[in-house]
Image: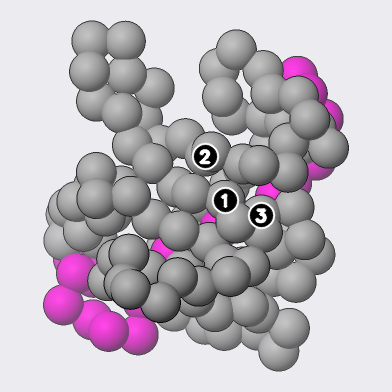
Amino acid sequence: MSAVEMANAIYVSDKAKEKVSKLMTDAGIGADPSYFLRVSVVGGGCSGLSYKLDFDNESKPMDQVFEDNGVKVVTDLKSFLYLVNTTLDFSDGLNGKGFYFTNPNASRTCGCGDSFSV
């Protein structure tokens, strides 16, 4: 992160940045600056809410836009309320679980790391 830390944002770790870049390149959209990572929170999962990640190139009127570590992250306003100061990370070890979120707003998370409650 830069010397001036952003407050109330969504952050991206170095490992997550590498994986997002690779996936965008593999999808043929890595060189297109109109694409970004859309992060949202949807109902479901064993703890009540789940994270959803997609590549998108269409902004919506109430979208919140962030850029961290060279990755443009967009979320809708409702999802952002659950994602304030959350970090997107990636684990690829033997027990790796892929993308996961470190969410200071979650009061409970499930074992798989894909769902949470507040």
Q: Mark 3 points at which residue?
A: 83
Relative side of 61 to 25, left or right:
right
Disc 1 residue type?
Thr
> Residue, x 33% and y 50% (percent of image)?
13
**Disc 1 residue crowd, few under 14, some 14–19, many 20+, Cα 10 Å:** some
Residue 6 in the image: state x and y as whole percent: 50, 73
Magenta stretch containing residue 44, yes or no? yes
Q: Which of marks 2 and 3 is nearer the N terminus?
A: 3
Q: Nearer the viewer, residue 45 or 28?
A: 45
Q: Name the residue under label 1.
A: 86
Residue 39 in the image: state x and y as whole percent: 56, 58
Q: Name the residue under label 2.
A: 101
Relative side of 30 to 75, left or right:
left
Q: Say if residue 23 shows up in the picture.
A: no
Magenta stretch containing residue 28, yes or no? yes
Residue 46 in the image: state x and y as whole percent: 75, 19
**Residue farthest to the bottom?**
61
The quadrant of the rendering that contains the N terminus is bottom left
> Residue, x 19% and y 69% (percent of image)?
30
> Residue, x 83% and y 37% (percent of image)?
118
Q: What element carries label 2?
A: strand
Main SS of residues in magenta: loop
**Disc 2 residue crowd, few under 14, some 14–19, many 20+, Cα 10 Å:** some
Q: Are marks 1 and 3 in contact (CB under 8 Å)?
A: yes
Q: Which of marks 1 and 2 is nearer the N terminus?
A: 1
Task: Indicate the quadrant where residue 57 lies.
Answer: bottom left
Q: Nearer the viewer, residue 48 or 105?
A: 105
Disc 2 residue type?
Phe
Relative side of 6 to 55, left or right:
right
Q: Give the range drawn in magenta.
A: 27-48
Q: How far apart are marks 1 and 2 (CA)?
A: 7 Å
The label shown at residue 46 is none
